[in-house]
């Protein structure tokens, strides 16, 4: 969603953008074999300046990748990128995720095009310690990761905490921070005028270990939340869904927890407007779309003191933060907000204002355009000196 929003905002600002990405769903492909396809699902306001090209991959779904999917994407994206770089003179090439996409950097360097590498989370060693396979891959790929960061024209981190984590791998890394944005028209506050009788909390997350959903379910078992009849809605899907449903049943909270599955963005926005509190308790988080959408929806937030979350959520001001892995403290934070309607309202108002002033996609795109412009000017200066 972030890549799509950035690409659209750039084209609306008059920049021509080609997007080379993966197609989920196996080997099915249309058009010329090995050359990918160009989709027609491009907003009219982009004025023909946006092309989306998809290459085959063994990606199971939009939010489900893995090492095989990553490698197959690079395998098929490489010849397509070679073809594009030969036919088109780009001012900059922007590689989202240093792994696997950064493996394509050598092609970009060969033609002398300025490059940007974006660190998004799981591409940084040490980010997701709950995934042993990912940790092994990062350990084996450390020299490659350092090479990518050192030879990129510019490195952008999704949050300052992510950039600092990357420096544990490369102490000399220089980076700038550009946060994700959010559609503040689609994600907006509810127009309810009076507080509800029964509170609804909502979580939006992929069902993976680092999102801390088992801790949240255990928090819902705490007596204070049981007595208050607080309900929890969980939006998302993943391989852990069966285990999470079993845990919900074993804790005796199935009547107060609803699994909504994966929803389209309009439905997610609607569910956020219906909710009273956004809650997510990850063990690592670069500050992704879910938190940004909760901010824009004017919800008070309960989260954990990890990653990029404290960069936007100030404990006690526009949300409550607790240590990760502590269901009891999590339940206490939820109960604190449940018992204070005015505090929820004040926090939600501050979050909406923060989203409007700091997280619009136009502002994010403008930050990236500044980075691109600096790279172009540097290339021109280097050419003149030569």
Image (cartoon, rainbow, N blue to C red):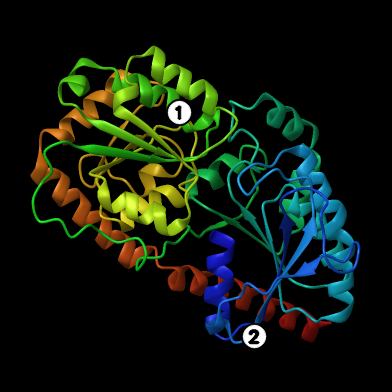
Name the residue: 53% across, 29% down. 241
Q: Earlier in the sequence, mark 2 or mark 1?
A: 2
Q: Nearer the viewer, residue 134 or 296?
A: 296
Q: Quadrant of residue 254?
A: top left
Marks 2/1: CA–CA distance: 42 Å
Q: Secondary structure at mark 2?
A: loop
Q: Please indicate whether residue 243 sits to the left or right of residue 325 in the image.
A: right
Q: Are marks 2 and 1 in contact (CB under 8 Å)?
A: no
Residue 60, given in percent of the width and then of the height, sits at: 70, 43
Q: Please indicate whether residue 380 sits to the left or right of residue 119 in the image.
A: right
Question: Residue 48's mark?
Answer: 2
Question: Residue 212's mark?
Answer: 1
Q: Nearer the viewer, residue 68 or 346?
A: 68
For disc 1, the neighbor class at 10 Å (few under 14, some 14 to 19, many from 20) is many
Question: Which of the image's four quarters has the C terminus?
Answer: bottom right
Q: Quadrant of residue 3?
A: bottom right
């Amino acid at each position: 969603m972030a890549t799509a929003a950035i690409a659209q905002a750039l084209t609306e600002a008059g920049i021509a953008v080609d997007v080379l990405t993966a197609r989920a769903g196996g080997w099915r492909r249309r058009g010329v074999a090995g050359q990918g396809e160009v989709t027609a699902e491009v907003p009219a306001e982009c004025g023909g300046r946006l092309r989306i090209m998809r290459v085959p991959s063994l990606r199971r779904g939009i939010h489900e990748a893995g090492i095989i999917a990553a490698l197959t994407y690079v395998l098929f994206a490489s010849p397509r990128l070679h073809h594009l770089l030969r036919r088109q003179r780009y001012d900059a090439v922007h590689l989202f995720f240093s792994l696997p996409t950064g493996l394509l950097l050598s092609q970009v360097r060969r033609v002398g095009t300025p490059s940007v590498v974006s660190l998004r989370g799981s591409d940084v060693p040490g980010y997701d310690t709950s995934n042993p396979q990912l940790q092994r891959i990062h350990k084996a790929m450390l020299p490659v990761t350092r090479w990518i960061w050192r030879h990129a024209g510019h490195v952008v981190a999704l949050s300052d905490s992510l950039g600092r984590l990357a420096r544990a791998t490369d102490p000399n890394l220089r980076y700038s921070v550009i946060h994700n944005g959010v559609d503040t028209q689609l994600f907006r506050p509810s127009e309810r005028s009076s507080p509800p009788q029964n509170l609804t909390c909502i979580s939006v997350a992929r069902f993976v270990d680092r999102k801390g959903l088992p801790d949240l379910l255990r928090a819902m078992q705490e007596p204070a939340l049981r007595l208050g009849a607080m309900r929890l809605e969980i939006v998302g899907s993943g391989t852990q869904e069966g285990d999470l449903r079993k845990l919900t049943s074993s804790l005796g909270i199935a009547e107060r927890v609803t699994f909504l599955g994966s929803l389209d963005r309009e439905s997610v926005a609607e569910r956020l407007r219906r909710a009273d509190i956004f809650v997510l308790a990850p063990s690592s988080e670069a500050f992704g779309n879910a938190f940004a959408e909760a901010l824009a929806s004017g919800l008070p937030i309960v989260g954990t003191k990890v990653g990029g979350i404290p960069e936007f959520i100030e404990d006690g001001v526009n949300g409550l933060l607790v240590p990760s892995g502590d269901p009891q403290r999590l339940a206490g934070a939820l109960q604190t907000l449940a018992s204070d309607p005015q505090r929820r309202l004040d926090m939600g108002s501050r979050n909406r204002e923060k989203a409007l002033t700091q997280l619009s996609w136009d502002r994010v795109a403008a930050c990236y355009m500044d980075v691109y412009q600096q790279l172009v000017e540097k290339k021109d200066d280097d050419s003149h000196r030569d």
